[in-house]
């Protein structure tokens, strides 16, 4: 159960893997997939053939082996892992944006949240966790097939009590009237969010927060213009993450200049300001751990604009 | 920026929790629905659009000093969060009065794009000389106006009328001038509800060293990476004054447990938790337990040096963080609200956050493992800490470690890789940039914070040591 909604179903990772469970099969840090466990099924990958029946009864987090001795790890699904393994029907939001949105929208358990569009359900899954167990996410998409796929995913992940998917063109029609005045947060990921902002302003409770995600600055400018009439505290951000990789660096013990070539790879001439502390730590062999930023990175996803519905004084 | 004492770090009496709990009970309010400030609640006051941020508690004697005027905070009780106030002079002296959201903050859009451009075509600042002679009203004139009861807005209008250079300025420049004068003569006070976002941002802006320079995007990532949610059993090592414990509790929301653990015998201070206005339900879920009690090697709970962990006094030697009760120069009267714990409403027995974890819950943690681990201890030896804490996590449970320095996390990651206790590890450095979005004036903010710390995240797994268990036929 990805997001527990009652005490009995709480995240007990010690619960053994059962028939019908969704597990996240971790092959490598950049290779994972979601698999539904069935006693008659097998998983085939570069590490060999894995029988699901070997998995049943083991705890989540176990290492399991293939017929030829390769292994993978079986992980319990979480919204983060789901974001990394779900099938992309649209461009999705990733962890840095998702986590910032959930915090900045001030979503806590019990909140009622509106989202449009649903897309591939990446953010929706995290929003469900944020409002659980007593809140609810109403998510809208104008594309019928994508809405269906999202609904199927949410059902597979046990989230139907937390998420309602509706096919609706929010830009054209606005949010349904039934939500007016009752909503704690609104998230918009639309090509023309300014068309949805007036309706959002009617749905939000005073001082509640709206977020609009747009890849292009022109969209942001137009959205902010529209926001100014009913909203305050309008702020726009970019959120990114830089990853680091580490490497063990072994260097020879007490090599003096005259001794000729040192054992192993030549020591790095480049100054490592972070190194000195390590030299005294390792007694068994001379090595240190170096870190450097990864050279590939996501350069841009979208701008996040947040605003609070102005509180009137009457 | 003037220094203020943040009242969140004060000794808040248990009565404050009672008031809050009984008010909530009386109004049938859940965590989510508390839309208006109540007596004794913790609030964040935003003066002049973020220029000055002050935490306070709405006790009967609470007040705030704006400019040189001291105003009682009483008018704020019962007002919705998000209400705006201005300082008005009245028979009883200066007081805060609820005002309509003025277009002052939004007057940017009064200058339409076309108007701004055409005006700018003929105006620039080539002939404006900055020699302090442009304003013909003196400070005595302004004081006289004030004593005659002129409002702040009227004074601003007068200043504009008496400025010889105003007409020559560009439209954008005029707007900037007007806003600047409004901030000085017609200051606004915005009543804000404390939440993880506002508490983290305020500390980051004002006293970042007290919260280990934890930036709001970094904290958000920690919560997501550690999969904090309902029914979580979250293990937290928080040496940031309780910011992390409070944020985790906010997300878990009255179910599950948050275990704030500590090494040694003295619990770490988690006073910031009290700024969140948590109900009794949530407070009851925030527990403290020394590491020795949690470690599977120890079967009997150790004696705790302090009988009541939530009453930790100032300056305990084991906590490396600065003493939150240290005296700081303050020019307003937050001290009053701090020391007068005179909330007298009785009713429900208050529950202090951070009480000692009962043995049966500790046992369940030992048996089942925690479902999340967050470490935020910038001065501690994280690579050895993690080897102690990780075994307390259930298999497949995620962890996230915050640190200000890269090298310790690199060493930590390397150690964990070698020990095969964790997979999916990543060292991340969050990056955050804010934009000014205005017609014809959109660009990133001129000032930017360059560093929000590093995070090492990963998932704990079963360490089988690489032995092949060949079950295949």
Image (cartoon, helix red, strand yellow):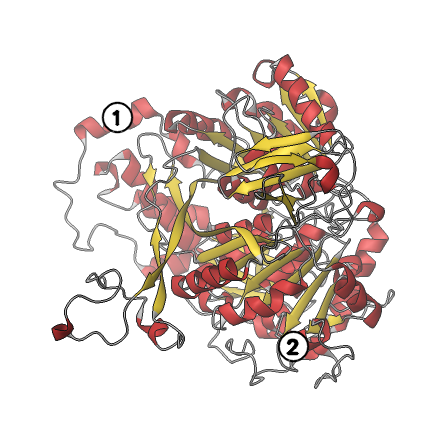
Say if mark 2 contacts mark 1, CB within 8 Å: no
Residue B139 falls left or right of residue A72: left
Q: List x then y, in percent, for residue B128.
A: 15, 44
Based on the displayed image, in which of its 4 quarters is residue A303 positioned?
A: top left
Q: Secondary structure at mark 2?
A: loop
Q: Secondary structure at mark 1?
A: helix
Residue that badge 2 annotates: B267
Q: Quadrant of the N terminus of chain B?
A: bottom left
Question: In this orientation, which residue lies closer to the viewer: B362 or A267?
Answer: A267
Residues packed near mark 1 inside 10 Å, few (<14), some (14 to 19) or many (20 plus): some
Up-down relation of residue B375 to residue B333 (above or below): above
Up-down relation of residue A256 to residue B83 (above or below): below
Dot label at residue B318: none
Q: Quadrant of the C terminus of chain B?
A: top right
Whether callout 2 and callout 1 share a subunit is answered: yes
Residues packed near mark 2 inside 10 Å, few (<14), some (14 to 19) or many (20 plus): many
Question: In this orientation, which residue lies closer to the viewer: B413 or B467?
Answer: B467
Q: List x then y, in percent, for residue A68.
A: 58, 40
Residue A311 visible? The answer is no
Up-down relation of residue B409 to residue A132 (above or below): below
Q: Nearer the viewer, mark 2 or mark 1?
A: 2
Residue B278 falls left or right of residue B5: right
Question: In this orientation, which residue lies closer to the viewer: A90 or B242?
Answer: A90
Residue name at image x 85 percent, y 54 percent: B26
Up-down relation of residue A82 to residue B431 (above or below): above
Based on the displayed image, in which of its 4 quarters is residue B42 positioned?
A: bottom right
Residue that badge 1 annotates: B117
Which callout, 2 or 1, points at the residue further toward the start of the chain? Answer: 1
Q: List x then y, in percent, for residue B47.
A: 49, 55
Q: Residues under labels 2 and 1: Cα distance?
A: 61 Å
Residue name at image x 55 percent, y 70 percent: B385
Residue A257 visible? The answer is yes
């Amino acid at each position: 159960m990805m997001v527990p909604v009652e005490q009995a179903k709480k995240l007990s990772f010690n619960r053994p893997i059962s028939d019908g469970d969704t597990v996240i099969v971790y092959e490598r840090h950049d290779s994972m997939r979601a698999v539904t466990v069935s006693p008659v099924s097998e998983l085939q990958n570069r590490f060999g053939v894995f029988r699901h029946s070997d998995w049943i009864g083991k705890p989540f987090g176990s290492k399991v082996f293939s017929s030829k001795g390769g292994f993978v790890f079986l992980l319990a699904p979480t919204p983060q892992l789901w974001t990394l393994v779900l099938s992309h029907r649209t461009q999705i939001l990733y962890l840095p944006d998702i986590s910032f949105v959930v915090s900045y929208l001030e979503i806590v358990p019990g909140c009622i949240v509106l989202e449009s569009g649903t897309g591939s359900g990446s953010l929706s899954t995290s929003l469900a966790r944020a409002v659980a167990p007593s809140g609810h996410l109403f998510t809208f998409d104008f594309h019928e097939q994508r809405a269906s796929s999202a609904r199927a995913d949410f059902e597979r992940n046990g989230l139907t009590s937390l998420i309602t998917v509706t096919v609706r063109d929010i830009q054209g029609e606005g949010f349904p009237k039934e939500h007016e005045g009752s909503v704690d947060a609104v998230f918009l990921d639309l090509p023309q969010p300014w068309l949805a902002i007036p309706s959002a302003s009617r749905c939000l409770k005073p001082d509640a927060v709206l977020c609009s995600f747009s890849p292009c600055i022109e969209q942001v400018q137009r959205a902010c213009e529209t926001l100014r009439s009913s909203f305050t505290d309008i702020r726009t951000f970019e959120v990114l993450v830089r990853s680091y990789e580490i490497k063990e660096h072994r260097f020879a013990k007490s090599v003096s200049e005259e001794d000729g070539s040192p054992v192993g790879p030549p020591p790095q001439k480049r100054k490592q300001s972070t190194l000195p502390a390590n030299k005294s730590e390792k007694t068994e062999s001379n090595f240190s751990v170096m870190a450097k930023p990864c050279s590939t990175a996501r350069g841009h996803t979208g701008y996040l604009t947040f605003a609070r519905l102005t509180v009137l004084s009457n | 920026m003037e220094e203020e004492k943040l009242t969140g770090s004060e000794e808040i009496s248990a009565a404050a929790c009672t008031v809050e709990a009984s008010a909530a009970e009386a109004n049938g309010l859940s965590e989510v629905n508390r839309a208006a400030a109540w007596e004794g609640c913790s609030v964040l006051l935003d003066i002049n659009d973020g220029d000055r941020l002050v935490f306070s508690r709405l006790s009967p004697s609470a007040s705030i000093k704006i400019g040189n005027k001291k105003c009682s905070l009483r008018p704020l009780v019962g007002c919705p969060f998000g209400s705006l106030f201005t300082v008005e002079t009245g028979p009883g002296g200066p007081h805060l009065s609820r005002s309509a959201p003025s277009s002052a903050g939004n007057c940017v859009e009064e200058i339409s794009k076309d108007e701004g451009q055409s005006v700018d075509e003929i105006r620039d600042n080539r002939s404006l000389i900055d020699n302090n002679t442009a304003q013909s009203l003196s400070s005595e004139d302004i004081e006289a106006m004030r004593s005659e009861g002129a409002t702040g807005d009227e004074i601003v209008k007068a200043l504009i009328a008496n400025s010889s250079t105003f007409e020559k300025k560009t439209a954008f420049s005029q707007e900037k001038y007007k806003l600047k004068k409004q901030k000085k003569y017609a200051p606004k006070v915005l009543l804000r509800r404390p939440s993880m976002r506002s508490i983290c941002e305020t500390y980051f802006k004002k006293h970042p060293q007290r919260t280990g320079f934890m930036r709001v995007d970094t904290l958000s990532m920690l919560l997501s990476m550690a999969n904090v949610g309902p029914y979580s059993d979250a293990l937290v090592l928080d040496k940031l004054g309780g910011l992390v414990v409070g944020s985790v509790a906010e997300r878990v929301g009255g179910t599950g447990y948050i275990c704030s653990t500590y090494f040694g015998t003295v619990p770490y201070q988690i006073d910031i938790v009290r700024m969140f206005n948590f109900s009794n339900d949530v407070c009851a879920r925030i527990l403290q337990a020394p590491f020795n009690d949690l470690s599977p090697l120890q079967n009997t709970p150790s004696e705790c040096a302090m009988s009541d962990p939530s009453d930790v006094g100032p300056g305990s030697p084991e906590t490396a963080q600065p003493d939150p009760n240290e005296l700081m120069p303050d020019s307003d009267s937050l001290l009053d609200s701090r020391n007068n714990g005179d909330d007298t409403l009785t009713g429900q027995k208050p529950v202090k956050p951070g009480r000692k974890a009962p043995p049966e819950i500790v046992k369940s943690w030992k048996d089942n493992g925690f479902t999340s681990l967050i470490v935020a201890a910038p001065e501690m030896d994280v690579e050895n800490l993690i080897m102690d804490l990780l075994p307390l996590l259930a298999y497949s449970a995620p962890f996230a470690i915050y640190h200000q320095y890269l090298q310790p996390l690199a060493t930590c990651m390397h150690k964990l890789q070698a020990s095969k206790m964790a997979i999916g590890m990543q060292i991340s450095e969050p990056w955050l940039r804010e934009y000014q979005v205005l017609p014809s004036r959109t660009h990133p903010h001129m000032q930017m914070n360059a560093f929000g710390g590093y995070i090492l995240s990963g998932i704990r797994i079963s360490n089988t040591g690489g032995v092949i268990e060949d079950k295949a036929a």
